[in-house]
Image (cartoon, helix red, strand yellow):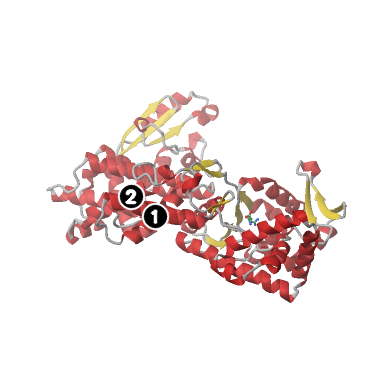
Amino acid sequence: MIDYRDIIASEIFSDELGLSKDEIKSMIEIPSDESMGDFAFPCFRLAKTMRKSPQIIAADIAEKISVCNIFYKVEQVNAYVNVFINPSHIAENVVYEINKLGSEYGKSEIGQGKNIIVDFSSPNIAKPFHIGHIRSTVIGNSICKLYEALGYNVIGVNHLGDYGTQFGKMIVAYRKWGKEEELVKEPIKTLLGYYTKFHEEAEKDPSLDDEAREAFVRLEEGCEEEVELWEKFREYSLEEFNRVYKMLGITFDSYAGESFYSDKIPAVVEELKNKNLLEESQGAQIVDLEEYDLGAAMIMKSDGSSLYVTRDIATAIYRKNTYNFAKNLYVVASQQNLHFKQWKKVLNLMGYDWEKDCIHVPFGLVSLEDGEILSTRKGKVIFLEDLLKNAVAKTKDIMLEKNPDIPEIDTISREVGIGAVIFQELSNNRIKDYVFTWDKVLNFDGETGPYVQYTHVRASGILRNSTEDEINKAKEGTCDYSYLSGESAFRLIKLLYRVPEVIEDAANRYEPSILTRHLVEISQLFNKFYHDEHILVDNKDERIAKLSLVMATKIVIANSLALLGINAPERM
Ligand code: ARG
């Protein structure tokens, strides 16, 4: 793909500036106000070394850049050199290239040979996969796809919460009140019921807690009966989680959860001891982090059982040894900030310099405005599966109202309904808390998934109504791209051009919303182009040029939606 920054940097470069071409390139900006050019080079930094005012430097540079078929205007405004790209030049280069690359457009190889671990979703066995977990699942999945697009080898890990003292409680509860046939039908709701009952009963009879502790110790020791029950809980829960993952189209490379590390704990405790990091506190083993303002990290309870942070330390070491990761990301709610700070500090104190590559990617809370619409409420828990089913049903109603004869309504309402939920999740800056509202999620005209998908459908429809000959010519670029110089076409093409850098930026900042927002802008401009200009005009050259832009936009929307984990339907 043509690199305008590179061309501009070469034009600007000269020895007297005292900057390398790469430095110049990295300084080139894209002005938010298009009347200030398509690219701008700020000269403030040069004033000191060149002992001239930045305005004068900018004027000299502007003078030097030749106006040619690539740039139609170069001007100095204050301390900036503003460069204007010739619309037919960018149209010819960008539209042609996108149509040639197809599904490869936006990808790069910068991550070649590097491993990245993304720890995401990671629900707790026997506990509901609720609306809060959707954030980790959806954001994590998109981060995986963004890094894959950059050529990294991504290992998506579902670090299942399948271990810990709560399993002792679950075992005791199941022994007392459990019924296999209930469990088979609705594993998680049933287990949750037993668990709640356990807590109620244990308030009246504290000996239950002792029983639970014993059961967990027996589980850790590998006693057959406890292990069998635990395996049953894990298996049934996984079945239920997998149903949700299937609806979302999400897969994992590994399900190594907390239990996977249980046999690696003793070595970690030993290591901490040898490195003089462990201290005894009220019978428990801790790492004192008071001097870093991080309290104490509890490594081992007085009864010898391990904790969440202990297992996370073992996990990080195992992952480094197994995958030699370039980055090890944890997509987990910001409520766990302290946990991850403590954990990183402990790894750091253990002397692992790769701790800096272990990154907690936090996100904010989601709350519900109209709780009662989400029918299955149990306490305050909203089950993700119910939410997704609800989204599909609501979408089906909306679509039937718009067009009662739509073929394959079930497939399409699934793609649109689930896409809408995912898109909404990825629309906001991940760190922000937000309120989930159906009206916002399913609005076909707002900045939503359905709106973007509908834009894709519109582009598909236009191409369907064209002849094979036209399609081939548009793809091969046998056309006059100067027909794409109108304002909306030009602005749309510039957005398409920036997609690879938007993908890179979104990955670097672990922020899929950067891509989501860009995609909304692309859709808005495509629809503006569609309204401003007549596409299927009589003039054949013009028609083919415009079809080539429709084709390129369709490709970019489909590729970008895929990076968010959303399907791009052909019809809806
Ligand atoms: N199971 C945890 C929870 O639901 C999330 C685990 C995240 N991953 C990790 N390595 N700690 O809160």
Q: Is residue 232 above or below residue 561?
A: below
- Residue closest to the far front: 204
The residue indicated by pointer 2 is 398
Residue 67 appears in which quarter of the rendering? top left
SS under mark 1: helix
Amino acid identity at mark 2: Ile
Is residue 379 toward the left or the right of residue 270 in the image? left
Is residue 371 toward the left or the right of residue 326 in the image? left
| Residue found at x 26% / y 54% | 404
Amino acid identity at mark 1: Ala
Q: Nearer the viewer, residue 262 or 213?
A: 213
Q: Residues within 10 Å of mark 2 (few under 14, many from 20)?
A: some
Q: Is residue 545 above or below residue 35?
A: below
Q: Residues within 10 Å of mark 1 (few under 14, many from 20)?
A: some
| Residue found at x 41% / y 56% | 562
Mark drawn on residue 428: none
The residue indicated by pointer 1 is 393
Does the image show residue 413?
A: yes
- Whether label 1 lies within 8 Å of ligand 1 gets the answer no
Quadrant where ligand 1 appears:
bottom right
In the image, residue 491 lies at what x, y percent? 32, 40
In the image, residue 102 lies at what x, y percent? 34, 58
